C-alpha cells in the first residue's frame, strides 16, 4: 500500500480535487447539488473552514479552502463530506466485493488531490484554475455561465470582472 505524503499545516490554505469513483457519464454532483451544499455547510458548522473558491462539475470538484489556526485536519472534513453526501443518495451504484466487505459505498474515489498553497501567486493561479474548469471541460463557453461556482460571489466582491474568461480568450493562464 502506498505511503501518501501529506503536508499538515495548521491555518493552511489548500487546493483540493475530489473525484467521483465512476467519472464517465456521471452527473451525480450537480444532480444532487443541494445535498452536497447542505453536507458541506453541516461539516463547516462542526469543523470550520473558509471557502475561498469552489466549483462543482458533474463528476468532480475543486476548491481552495483555509483551515483555522491550530487546525490542520482537512482529512476529517473530507471524510465527513464524502460520508454525508453518500448517505443522502439512494443505493443504486455497483460496488466491488472489497467495497461491500468494507461497508463502503461506490460513490467517491478513496483518495483526493491536495496542494498546500505557497504564496499569493500560487493562490491566484489555483483560484483561476477552479473557475476556468467548466470552460476547460467544455461544459460552458463562459465562466459566468456555470452556476455551480463561487465565481458569481467573487464577481460581486470585485475579485473577478463579470466577463472574466468569457470565451473570447486566445490563451487562459491556469494551473494544470
Image: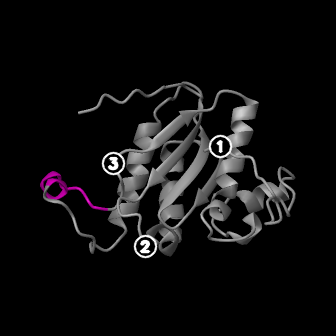
Residue on which the image places disc 2: 25
Q: Nearer the viewer, mark 3 or mark 1?
A: 1
Q: Nearer the viewer, residue 49 or 27?
A: 27
Residue nearer the viewer, 65 or 28: 28
Q: Secondary structure at mark 1?
A: loop
Q: Which residue does the numbered mark 3 point to in the structure image? A: 110
Q: Quadrant of residue 165?
A: bottom right
- Mark closer to the observer (2, 3): 2
Q: Position of residue 29 (x, y in %)?
A: 48, 67
- Ranked by sequence position, the earlier of labels 1 and 2 is 2
Q: Are marks 3 and 1 in contact (CB under 8 Å)?
A: no
Q: Cβ–Cβ below 8 Å for labels 2 and 3?
A: no
Quadrant, the C terminus = top right
Say whether residue 62 is left or right of residue 135: left
Q: Which residues are magenta?
A: 98-106
Q: Is residue 164 above or below residue 123?
A: below
**Where is residue 21 shown, x and y percent of the image?**
35, 59
Residue 162 versus residue 4 in the image, above or below: below
Q: Is residue 39 left or right of residue 135?
A: left
Residue occupied by mark 1: 175
Callout 2: few (<14), some (14-19), or many (20+) C-alpha neighbours within 10 Å? few
Instruction: Please check the rendered image and state whether residue 100 is part of the magenta-colored stretch, yes or no.
Output: yes
Determine the residue positioned at 53% across, 25% down.
9
Label 3 to label 1, Cα distance in Å? 23 Å
Say which element carries label 3. Answer: loop
> Does the segment drawn in magenta span residue 55?
no
Q: Characterize the local packing of mark 3: few (<14), some (14-19) or many (20 or more) Cα atoms within 10 angstroms.
A: few
**Do the residues under discs 1 and 2 have CB atoms within 8 angstroms?**
no
Answer with left or right where residue 55 lies relative to residue 42: right
* Residue lying at 47% horizontally and 59% vertically, measured from the top left: 39
Q: Which residue corresponds to the image point at 43% horizontal and 53% vertical from the top-left?
A: 81
Q: Quadrant of the N terminus?
A: top left
Amino acid at each position: 500500500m502506498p505511503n501518501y505524503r501529506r503536508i499538515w499545516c495548521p491555518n493552511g490554505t489548500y487546493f483540493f480535487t475530489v473525484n467521483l469513483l465512476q467519472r464517465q457519464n456521471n452527473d451525480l454532483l450537480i444532480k444532487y447539488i443541494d445535498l452536497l451544499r447542505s453536507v458541506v455547510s453541516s461539516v463547516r458548522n462542526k469543523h470550520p473552514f473558509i471557502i475561498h473558491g469552489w466549483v462543482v462539475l458533474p463528476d468532480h470538484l475543486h476548491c481552495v479552502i483555509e483551515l483555522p489556526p491550530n487546525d490542520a485536519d482537512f482529512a476529517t472534513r473530507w471524510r465527513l463530506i464524502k460520508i454525508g453526501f453518500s448517505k443522502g443518495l439512494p443505493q443504486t451504484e455497483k460496488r466491488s466485493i472489497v467495497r461491500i466487505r468494507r461497508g463502503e459505498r461506490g460513490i467517491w474515489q478513496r483518495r483526493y488531490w491536495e496542494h498546500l498553497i505557497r504564496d499569493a501567486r500560487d493562490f491566484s493561479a489555483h483560484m483561476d484554475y477552479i473557475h476556468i474548469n467548466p470552460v476547460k471541460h467544455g461544459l460552458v463557453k463562459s465562466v459566468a455561465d456555470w452556476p455551480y461556482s463561487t465565481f458569481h460571489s467573487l464577481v460581486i466582491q470585485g475579485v473577478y470582472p463579470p466577463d472574466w474568461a468569457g470565451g473570447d480568450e486566445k490563451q487562459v493562464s491556469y494551473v494544470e
